[in-house]
Image (spheres, helix red, strand yellow):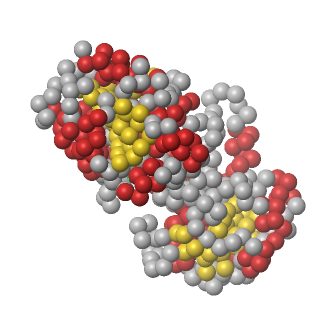
């Protein structure tokens, strides 16, 4: 039985693991396998990334260069752009991007490209796993027919499963090994072999009855977040209108020990997951004549937040008899969340764009993001990239308004509230003590 052959290779660490796509998801995963004694090969289309890995240098915040170098030096991790080496892998895990098209429909072209490379070299004895977030049915309806075209038979020759990635970049408490892994195979043998593989590197594996269940579970997780953040954002706008402190309201509600889970408002949602994944679910729903209204509503509320932030800036300046036109606005933090360097879908891009459209002179400071390009950001801004300025006393003092968009932990907020005139805090970065000792006027979301 092919399942038993694969499990036996995994058991005594003879199984070679291939990871296709070495980004925020793929590189930590490949490193984890290598650290647990497997020989891991990463497959990339970006030659520079492959070269960096082979030189033992990490380009992903969650993986230190030291950690990576150890695996590379031990001969357990290498990267390549030569997909012929897929033949040598016993387990192949696909971790390529799943963006949206301009029409907000799923773009599974990266999955198809990766699957095409695998299909060309598929051989008896391989386990193929998809980790990229996608709509329910992708593994059964798209991947399986492609691999079956080789003439090789599922369960007799190869196995196929979906196992969603749940990595939370920049979160030191939860890394690959202690985030439970959901596994859904196209067949029971596929589920069993995949669960066994992950159990070598992850503390807890949760098998489900099909690949579609695993695909849907991942989309539920991220849609749940998008919807609840939408609720918190709506509450923030309502509290602003009622002149009530949103954060105090949430803190109070969160003292209830059951039936409430705290979500927090912010300047808008960003990253490669929360703004995109719910569209994968609503697209699939539409295929079945189903209108997923929670998803549309959450998107509407969340995508309005950059406008609300600009309104807070405008209200603050107005109270000081200043206009938006010509006002100097310093944006603090442009990454989509704290302590990472990722600006994909970051609300900072929309906020800066809107402020510029109103005539503000915008600069930004972000210790993780040296340069900001607007070319692909669906904004009006174009031309030369913006570069991060140093957070000097002069820069703060010269700003008519400072907007905290991302609350990086290394920012000196005490100095900020001492020197700034007006601060718009979209993240509750300024605690009560800081607010008390502030000489700046503070407007909170
Ligand atoms: N970043 C996250 O926090 C996160 C969390 C959970 C799930 N996911 C999901 O995981 C998947 C990967 O996300 P990511 O953030 O790692 O993306 P990423 O853009 O950081 O990395 C993807 C990598 O794949 C490479 N690539 C593209 N096409 C390829 C191909 N045909 N062959 C080989 N390599 C190829 C790219 O060069 C890139 O290095 C997505 O589906 C995403 O939704 C991401």
How far across and down, in percent of the image, does residue 237 sit?
A: 61, 56
* Residue at the image position 25 percent from the left and 19 percent from the top: 2
Please indicate whether residue 9 sits to the left or right of residue 337 in the image. Answer: left
Q: In the rendered image, which quarter contains the N terminus?
A: top left
Q: In the rendered image, which quarter contains the C terminus?
A: bottom right
Please indicate whether residue 53 sits to the left or right of residue 108 in the image. Answer: right
Please indicate whether residue 99 sits to the left or right of residue 243 in the image. Answer: left
> From the viewer's perspective, is residue 435 above or below residue 353?
above
* Residue at the image position 46 percent from the left and 71 percent from the top: 374
> From the viewer's perspective, is residue 177 above or below residue 356?
above
How far across and down, in percent of the image, does residue 426 sit?
A: 66, 58
| Quadrant in the picture for residue 351 | bottom right
Q: Nearer the viewer, residue 104 or 57?
A: 57
| Quadrant in the picture for residue 364 | bottom right
How many numbered circles does the render carry? 0
Q: Residue furthest bottom?
A: 326
Please indicate whether residue 337 sits to the left or right of residue 104 in the image. Answer: right
> From the viewer's perspective, is residue 94 above or below residue 345?
above
| Quadrant in the picture for residue 152 | top left
* Residue at the image position 69 percent from the left and 65 percent from the top: 424
């Amino acid at each position: 039985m092919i399942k038993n052959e694969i499990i036996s290779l995994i058991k005594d660490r003879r199984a070679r693991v291939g990871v296709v796509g070495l980004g925020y998801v793929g590189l930590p995963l490949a490193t984890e396998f290598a650290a647990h004694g497997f020989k891991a090969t990463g497959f990339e289309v970006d030659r520079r990334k492959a070269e960096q890995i082979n030189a033992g240098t990490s380009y992903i915040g969650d993986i230190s260069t030291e950690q990576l170098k150890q695996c590379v030096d031990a001969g357990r991790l290498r990267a390549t752009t030569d997909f012929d080496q897929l033949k040598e892998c016993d387990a192949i895990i696909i971790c390529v991007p799943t963006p949206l098209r301009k029409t907000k429909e799923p773009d599974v072209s990266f999955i198809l490209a990766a699957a095409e490379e695998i299909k060309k070299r598929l051989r008896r004895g391989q386990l193929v796993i998809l980790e990229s977030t996608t709509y329910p049915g992708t593994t059964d309806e798209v991947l399986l027919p492609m691999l079956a075209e080789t003439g090789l038979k599922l369960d007799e020759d190869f196995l196929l499963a979906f196992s969603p990635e749940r990595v939370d970049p920049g979160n030191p408490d939860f890394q690959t090994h202690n985030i439970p892994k959901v596994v859904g195979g196209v067949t029971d043998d596929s589920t069993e072999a995949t669960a066994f593989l992950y159990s070598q590197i992850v503390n807890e594996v949760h098998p489900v009855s099909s690949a579609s269940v695993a695909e849907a579970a991942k989309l539920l997780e991220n849609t749940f977040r998008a919807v609840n953040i939408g609720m918190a954002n709506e509450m923030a706008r309502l509290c602003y209108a009622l002149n009530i402190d949103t954060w105090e309201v949430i803190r109070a509600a969160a003292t209830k020990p059951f039936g409430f889970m705290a979500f927090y408002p912010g300047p808008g949602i960003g990253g490669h997951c929360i703004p995109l994944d719910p569209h994968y679910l609503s697209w699939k729903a539409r295929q079945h004549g189903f209108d997923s209204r929670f998803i549309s509503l959450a998107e509407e509320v969340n995508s309005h937040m950059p406008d609300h932030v600009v309104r807070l800036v405008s209200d603050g300046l107005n109270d000081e008899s200043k206009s938006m036109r010509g006002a100097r606005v310093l944006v603090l933090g442009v990454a989509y969340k704290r302590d990472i360097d990722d600006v994909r879908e970051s609300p900072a891009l929309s906020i800066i764009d809107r402020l510029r459209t109103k005539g503000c002179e915008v600069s930004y400071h972000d210790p993780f993001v040296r340069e900001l390009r607007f070319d692909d950001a669906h904004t009006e801004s174009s031309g030369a990239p913006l570069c991060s300025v140093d957070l000097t006393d002069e820069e703060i003092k010269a700003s008519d308004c400072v907007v905290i968009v991302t609350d990086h932990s290394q920012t000196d907020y005490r100095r900020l509230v001492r020197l700034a005139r007006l601060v718009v805090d979209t993240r509750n970065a300024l605690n009560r003590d800081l607010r008390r000792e502030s000489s700046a006027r503070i407007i909170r979301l």
